[in-house]
Amino acid sequence: MTSISQFRRVLLGACLTVLAACGGSGHSADTLVFGRGSDSVGLDPALETDGESFKVCDNLYETLVTYSPGSTQVVPQLAREWSVDESGLEWTFHLRTDVQFHDGTPFNAEAMLFSLGRQFFPDHPFHKLAAGSYQYWKDMGMDDIIADMSAPNDSTFVVRLAAPNAPFLSNLGMNFCAAVSPTAVRTHGADYFKNPVGTGPFRFVEWLKDERIVLARNDSYWGPEPQIKRLVFRSIQDPSVRFLELRAGALHGMDNLSPEFLDELRANDQINLLTQPGMNVGYLAMNNDKPPYDDRRVRMALNHAINKQSLVDNFYGGLAEAAKNPIPPMMWSYNDDIEPYAYDPARARALLAEAGFANGFDTELWAMPAPRPYMPQPEKIAQAIQADLAQVGIRARIVSMEWATYLDKVFNGHHDLCLLGWTGDNGDPDNFLYVLLDKMAAIKPAQNVAFYRSDELHDILVAGRTQTDPAIRTQLYREAQRIIHRDAPWVPLVHATQTAAFRRQVDGFQLHPTGSKWFSATHITTSN
């Protein structure tokens, strides 16, 4: 618990940060300070996989296409327009010619080829920019989707696919497909992730690790000029401190709200509470590579042992619903015919006994150190799950660590059980099912942190990508959900409502289904 004296020290530091960023005025309309639960891992959009990194990247970078406000409809961004030939294989993008990177170098087709080519071409000089691989590119299956890409002239970028692919265009709107400055990548090499240069409405200024990232308005931006001059992302892990700083005016906005503060937020006439159905899932992954989780009966037992509705009632303030599928109910192809695993500790104990664990077993339950949109109170949720598992004889020791380390270790399979989740990037079921549960996503470092591998599921998910008929794709994804439910690699826990809160003087910010935090249209009034 945070003491009053501790809070005063934290709040004083926050106010000094705001005052410094605002040039000495706490009421400046030039600077917006946004509070979040943890720091970014990095700022190279091709290397990062976590939402905290993408919140900043959203404002630094741009992609060929993007999503319209409030939906996942694909609209132009760095590409003015595009076309695809009759075979569905060759996509031609006609680029804007009035764009430059933050370092003053021109954006053109060669820069786009460099940005995507470093992830695709094995002989690209920056294909091995950092340890590991371009994980998002790999997990989206882009090497299998794309056959070639080229830049026939400065304003034309061409991608040739290996086969028609339904989600391809939507994929291009995701952060990993952003345009990066070739000059900056060549200059900084493996340190580019902390020296980012894009074409977006804000440019990078400074990064004080675990404290703040500061962006400044891009005065050479090709689009509408942002109304705020400085954008500060502050890292405040304790949700109580984050809320108190918002209430005191040291923050203009925050996300990942703890449910315990919702009633007070609603009653505070100086703060606006924003909510939107979340395109997300929070889940407990069981490492199928490790006994006893290689036994489906054990995995089914855990599904029966955990009281999901209790989690919703106690830790989400009503702003969530219990999950039964890996994709949220708001997403097309959701299979509502699936019967969820009922909360049934007796059935869980019987399954464990059948699997040879009548006396239970010892295990580790890894819990995230910081709140996420799908899990605002991960430590408390882990404790509740620990208690549920204890009721059926599973003795789980909770393990936590710093966010970047946590991700690295779970992606590489060090855990027994781990809490994690996902916010959809592009509105397509492929972005959940293939990325999180396909056998190709179980190659370390893996987004498939259950390390679940099913040839049957793989064939269906590949077919879902290559089919273009929405009705056929819907049936394929409904079948995929049935297979996943049967094999039980996860305990799907919740689909959480997306939340954020802003001071009344902040206007123009809009929640997006993808969880993106775009601030280019946001402004601050000087009235209190």
Image (spheres, rainbow, N blue to C red):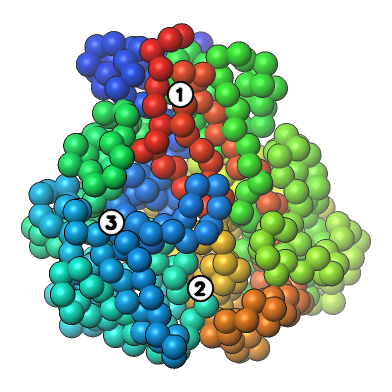
Q: Which residue is identified by label 3? A: 44
Q: Earlier in the sequence, mark 1 or mark 2?
A: 2
- Say which of 32 and 136 sits in front: 32
Q: Position of residue 136 (x, y in %)?
A: 40, 67
Q: Position of residue 211 (x, y in %)?
A: 33, 32
Q: Is residue 135 left or right of residue 382?
A: left
| In the foreground, 454 or 123 | 123
In what element is the residue under mark 1? strand
Q: What residue is at 81 percent from the left and 65 percent from the top?
A: 336
Badge 1 density bin: few <14, some 14–19, many ≥20, Cα 10 Å: some
Q: Is residue 441 above or below residue 278?
A: below
Query: Which of the two discs, 3 and 2, labels the residue nearer the N terminus?
Result: 3
Q: Which residue was labeled with disc 2?
A: 167
Q: Which mark is residue 506?
A: 1
Report the Cα–Cα distance between label 3 and label 2. 23 Å
At label 1, which amino acid type do we have?
Val
Q: Position of residue 516 (x, y in %)?
A: 46, 47
Q: Residue at x 24, y 47 (%)?
A: 222
Q: CA distance from mark 1 to mark 2?
A: 35 Å
Quadrant where the N terminus lies? Answer: top right
Q: Could you say which is closer to the camera, residue 396 or residue 403?
A: 403
The mark closer to the camera, 1 or 3, is 1
